[in-house]
Amino acid sequence: MRKSLVTLRFALYGCKNRPFFYIVATNRYKPRNRGYLEQVGTFDPVPNTRNEKLASLNMDRIRYWLSVGARPSRPVAILLGLAGVLPPHPHSLVVAARNRAALAAAAVTSDVPAEEVKEEDKEEVEENKENNANMTSRENQENDEDKNET
């Protein structure tokens, strides 16, 4: 089977430290930003104020290009898998499993039993308790002195 001449891929626009991508259908032998056949979407990988990465897809045209044999590049295939146009890309599943494991590990470490606390941490806790006790006893003495003066 021959490889398709048309590919769906990212074309980088934007400026330094602020990438912005067009999702384009193009001849696979052309350079990244040169001479695309059609722009079918955009992708802004920099999170906005709500921590969202924005993507705009022309689903009809993407489905058309896929139906005539265009092959998506790996990053576009991952994005289209997340959008539901294609089946989820295997890389997306690996990343999701890694994120779930990291969240589970973070939840476990936040619920650490007292036996697993390091000796250094125990010493710091004891010092903090002593300092707090000294501070409260000083405050109590000052309050008693103020009451005696009035």
Image: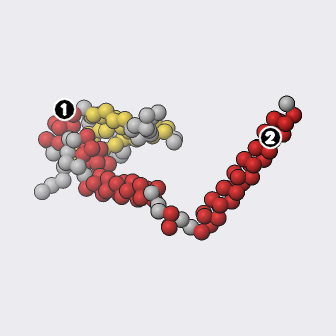
Figure quadrant of residue 108: bottom left
| 12 left or right of 114 in image | left
Q: Position of residue 28 (x, y in %)?
A: 27, 48
Answer above or below: position of 122 versus 110.
below
Q: Is residue 66 visible?
A: yes
Residue 144 circle label? 2
Q: Amino acid at mark 2?
A: Asp
Answer above or below: position of 64 versus 91.
above
The secondary structure type at the circle numbered 2 is helix
Residue at position x 46%, y 56% from top?
110
Q: Residue furthest right?
A: 149
Residue at position x 85%, y 36% from top?
148
Choose mark 2 or mark 1, whichever is in front.
Answer: 2
Q: Mark 2 touching mark 1, by CB under 8 A? A: no
According to the picture, the residue beneath numbered tag 1 turns out to be: 60
Q: Nearer the viewer, residue 147 or 58?
A: 147
| Category of crowding for the residue at label 1, using alpha-carbon neighbours closer than 10 angstroms: few (below 14), some (14–19), many (at least 20) | few
How many marks the image carries: the answer is 2
Q: Position of residue 72 (x, y in %)?
A: 25, 47
Q: Nearer the viewer, residue 96 or 126?
A: 126
Q: Amino acid at mark 1?
A: Asp
Label 2 – label 1 distance at C-alpha: 80 Å
Answer above or below: position of 88 versus 44.
below
Answer above or below: position of 149 versus 30.
above
Q: Nearer the viewer, residue 43 or 95?
A: 95
Residue at position x 70%, y 52% from top?
133
| 37 left or right of 145 in image | left
| Category of crowding for the residue at label 2, using alpha-carbon neighbours closer than 10 angstroms: few (below 14), some (14–19), many (at least 20) | few
Q: Nearer the N terminus, badge 2 or badge 1?
A: 1
Q: Is residue 5 visible?
A: no
The secondary structure type at the circle numbered 1 is helix
Q: Position of residue 69 (x, y in %)?
A: 15, 45
